[in-house]
Image (cartoon, helix red, strand yellow):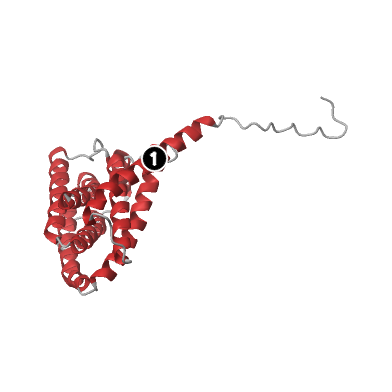
Amino acid sequence: MSGLVLVLTVFLACAVEAVEALTIVLAAGTSRNWRSALQGSAAALVTLAIVVAALGPAIGMIPFEALRLVVGALLLVFGLQWLRKAILRASGHKALHDEAGAYAKEVAAADAAAGGGRGIVTDWYAFTLSFKGVFLEGLEVAFIVVTFGNNQGSVPLAALGAAAAVVAVTGVGLAVRAPLARVPENSMKFAVGIMLTAFGVFWSAEGAGVDWPGADAALLVLVPVIALLGLGTAALLRRTDTAVPPAAATTVPPAPAAKGSTQ
């Protein structure tokens, strides 16, 4: 069961990153030049592979308990950030993430940018935009795979979840050649925030020497508890927000009339 939770968590987290990277590539290809956009994506993947190959083995040299403590703390920070934003969006205190709007913004910026190429790259702007999007989002995917895989002792399972997410998102995106606006990304981010927070609590506590009752089975309790806390907080924020009247109760008195004036 812990393996299934691992694959699902990595899949959801990587799917979010893949959607954001694909949105940037589609904007660059549609509004500028498809060849340059794909060249930038390929260059980013090659660079990313070199970085992971160079730094990945170094993570395995860190003592296991220290690795769990550090990675657990980092995941807890990231998870709480994702969960906080998801709660604010669910409660109406923050605008929902709009992938179609992000796509339109990228297209507008690409249209306004100057043209020109270098060497075999026809459109340097499209190349750079795609490279940046794929590389940065790819780094986050690599971090998720390496940290989750090493901590659970199953890098292949983590890689499987990431590969499935990237293939699924890329396949759908290339088929429709449009931003995946219908993907419930905000709900996915809520779920990922819950999962990352649960794993962060679990691993950081284990790294600090805590023995969880039932070992990995404790995740089956942590995940629903954190989910209930997140959903409850969002509901409480919605109720608090609607209970406050739209107009402030305090009435601002009118400014005093100037001397010698008549009203």
**Which quarter of the rendering shows the C terminus?**
top right
Residue at 23 percent across and 39 percent down: it is: 180
Query: Is residue 70 left or right of 3 when viewed as pictured?
Result: right
Instruction: Count the marks.
Output: 1
Residue 143 percent across, percent down from the top left: 24, 61
Percent position of residue 78, x then y: 34, 56
Query: Could you tell me which residue is drawn at 15 percent across and 69 percent down?
Result: 53
Q: For mark 1, what is the residue?
A: 89
**Pick the front one: 129 or 21:** 21
Residue furthest to the top: 263
User: Residue 209 appears at what percent x and percent y?
Assistant: 31, 66
Residue 198 drawn at (x, y percent): 30, 52
**Residue 185 vs residue 217, the one in the foreground:** 217
**Label 1 neighbour load within 10 Å: few <14, some 14-19, many 20+:** some
* Depth check, front residue: 87 or 206: 206
- Does the image show residue 114? no
Q: Residue at x 15, y 41 (%)?
A: 172
95 lies left or right of 159: right
